[in-house]
Image: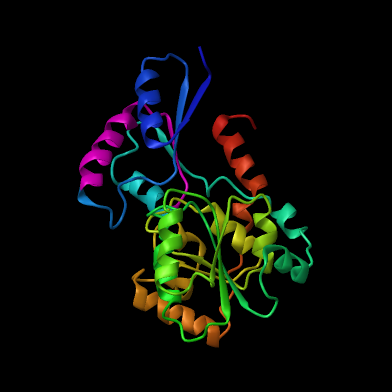
Amino acid sequence: HYDIIHCHTPVAGVLTRLAARTAKGTTVIYTAHGFHFYQGAPLINWLVYYPVERVCGKFTDKLITINQEDYHRANSWRLRNNGKIYYVPGIGVDLEEIQNISINKVQKKKEIGISNDVKVLLSVGELNKNKNHEIIIRVLSKLTNKNFIYLICGNGELKEYLKNLAKELGVSDKVKFLGYRKDVLEIYKIADLFLFPSKREGLPCSLIEAMACGLPCVASDVRGNKDLLRSDNLCKSNKEEEWLRLLNKAFCEKILVNELQDIYGVSHIKKNMQDIYGLN
């Protein structure tokens, strides 16, 4: 007897849509936060997730995609069935809150324990294989310019591995693992460059936040990231030699800032969702 059932994540999305398939008068909505079958995905992902999504599409009244690649694939690969497909650019960030943040950069750097005269590189994300912090640590060990500090905000299963890797490569004094932070928006404000080397993304909130803070960004050339950044700011191969070239360039030249469109603001996203829910 629900009016709307809105589900997220692949497993919960499948189970919920199957459970709700006989519900009468209920609108079933699924938000795909990045299909597991994507350009460059392993074959096993296509063999498992694509057929399942085709089946579940029969029980989906409204499918929400959060990046252009998924939106076009959903329309052209028969994931629509009789339902409707929507493009909603992520979950939104509070642009007004971010723009109103004002900090003393010298004091904030001192609080974190870093010198005021070094170049601050920053990554934000869970410490796992997909977020790919390892490649940045490996590349930093090859930089000739050592006037930098690399901050990583986030926790995860690879924390000890990454710490040991930094030690082995001789850059443990250049990499600071800050863990989970409630002041991440302030940390964006002290950074000089945001690095985002993920192997797979839906539409990354941390990259949107960094852009909203006016921070120059370099990211892997994958789905979601491509929606946000210009080609020059994307690491095409996501391999060490390409990242090394881009970071050397960042030390010699000014990396261009990509302006963030208002469509990624939370107020715009809320309006989109109200329209989909039929509340307007």
Residue 227 located left or right of residue 190: left
Give yes or no for residue 97 being in the magenta stretch. Answer: no
The picture places residue 114, in percent across and down from the top left corner, at 66, 71
Which quadrant, please, contains the C terminus? top right
Q: Main secondary structure of the magenta part?
A: helix
Residue 215 located left or right of residue 13: right
Who is closer to the viewer here, 214 or 108? Answer: 108
Residue 49 located left or right of residue 195: left
Coloring basis for residues: rainbow
The picture places residue 23, in percent across and down from the top left corner, at 41, 15
Who is closer to the viewer here, 77 or 6? Answer: 6
Q: What residue lies at 67% left-to-right and 57% top-to-bottom?
A: 185
The picture places residue 225, in percent across and down from the top left corner, at 46, 60
The mark total stands at 0
The quadrant in which residue 134 appears is: bottom left
In the displayed structure, 33 sits above or below 255; it is above
Residue 226 located left or right of residue 213: left
Q: What residue lies at 40% left-to-right and 29% top-to-bottom?
A: 12
Who is closer to the viewer here, 193 or 173? Answer: 173
The quadrant in which residue 241 appears is: bottom left
Q: What residue lies at 51% left-to-right and 62% top-to-bottom?
A: 228
In the displayed structure, 94 sits above or below 189; it is above
Can residue 136 be seen here? The reply is no
In the displayed structure, 261 sits above or below 272; it is below
* Span shown in magenta: 44-67
Can residue 95 be seen here? The reply is yes
Who is closer to the viewer here, 135 or 47? Answer: 135
Give yes or no for residue 49 being in the magenta stretch. Answer: yes
In the displayed structure, 165 sits above or below 71; it is below
The picture places residue 57, in percent across and down from the top left corner, at 33, 32
